[in-house]
Amino acid sequence: MKILYVIPGLKKGGAERIAIDICREISLRKGHQCLLLVLSNENEYRQLTTDIAIQQINSTVQLSLLRKNKIDLQEFDSVVNEFKPNIIHSHLFAAEILSREKIFPHIKYFTHCHDNMSQLRNFSTQTFFQKKLLIEFYEKQHLLKNYLKSNNKFIAISEHTKKYFERVLPAQLQKNIFLLHNAIAFKQFNAVNELQKPFDKIRILNVGSFVPKKNQKLFIAIAEELRSRHLDFEITLLGNGPIYAEIKKLTESKKLEQFFSMPGNVADVENYYARANLYIHTATYEPFGLVLLEAMATGLPVISLNGGGNQDLINDNENGFMIHDQNPKFFADKVELLFHNRNLFSKLSTGAVEFAKKFDIANYVDQLLMLYAKA
């Protein structure tokens, strides 16, 4: 079987990471080939992509309400005709639009529902009054025609995301939605795991892009609360993005810089998991949460704000705690509890590893290939 994976680019992110891991795992399977097709030359995962087949193209589909659509599929057509895939599997909206513009016979199409794609939201009265919403609604109608034409299949990564797609897709397509939780290369992260984490001080880790929905600003309030309790702690925030400078400035204005480390994007994220003993997730919206599984695989209990899709991953008092309110005291309570109760910490650490093991990429690809075969 030949699978063509289409993704806008390879910037740091969960969608990009799982696309890479899936392509690698499929390529290891006898009788299967996988080509990762990217629509831009950005690649922030160069160290992880040396052993998979990647090709970059310059094709584009730009839809316009008032002007003529700009469509150039020459390079895309060339790749499809040369590679001759059985499956086209797309990740993220730009890849959806482009890869569905021309439906090839005898190819089966899969959409990876990494999040609740805002472009597919249902029509509302607000659609008339906001140009962005009107354009997105036009794009949705255009894409839905191609989804129907191709009998498109949809892979939802969480119960939360599955319910969203059931609301926004027409009845004819709702039967094509399958729940398949995302996965990680478990062995890669578990290799640095030490079940008895050193806990001489509280070492908190967070990994994510610095964008408003990731809500790193909440860490400022959490740090103030931990400081007021005279706890010995440090917080490492990995990633970069538009609000990085703002968060950095806040740590300084609150005189908290001694508690924070913000090294940006790093290549050796596994080593940061290994040095931490707690993972805190503050995102207000989280369609799934691959980083939560990565943290668990290294033995880190997770304290997470309820972001929707990550409800599938947190079992209270088994692998961590789910917080339902952005109250820094609630986060600090759980941190302090685990710092003082080492038996509970060890229990949650062991539970985290056992839970993450169920989401190994090898098991995931077994299920994915079965979905392909049925199609």
Image (cartoon, helix red, strand yellow):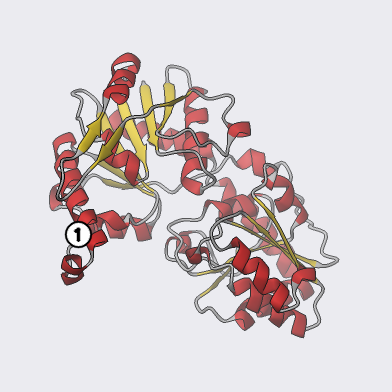
Instruction: Name the amino acid, label 1.
Output: Leu
Instruction: Find the residue positioned furthest to the front.
Output: 67
Q: Dividing the image into 4 quarters, which one contains the C terminus?
A: top left
Looking at the picture, how far across and down is residue 4, in whole percent? 37, 27
Looking at the picture, how far across and down is residue 162, in whole percent? 32, 55
User: Going 63% across and 76% down the picture, which residue do you hit?
Assistant: 331
Looking at the picture, how far across and down is residue 241, in whole percent? 55, 56
Decide if residue 226 is on the left or right side of residue 153. right
Looking at the picture, how far across and down is residue 339, in whole percent? 77, 72
Q: How many marks?
A: 1
User: Going 26% across and 27% down the picture, which residue do you hit?
Assistant: 73
Decide if residue 364 is on the left or right side of residue 301. left
User: Going 59% across and 71% down the picture, which residue do you hit?
Assistant: 217
Decide if residue 342 is on the left or right side of residue 21. right
Please tell me whether mark 1 sits on a helix, a strand or a loop: helix
Camera sees residue 98: yes
User: Going 30% across and 41% down the picture, which residue do you hit?
Assistant: 96
Dot 1, crowdedness within 10 Å: few (<14), some or many (≥20)?
some
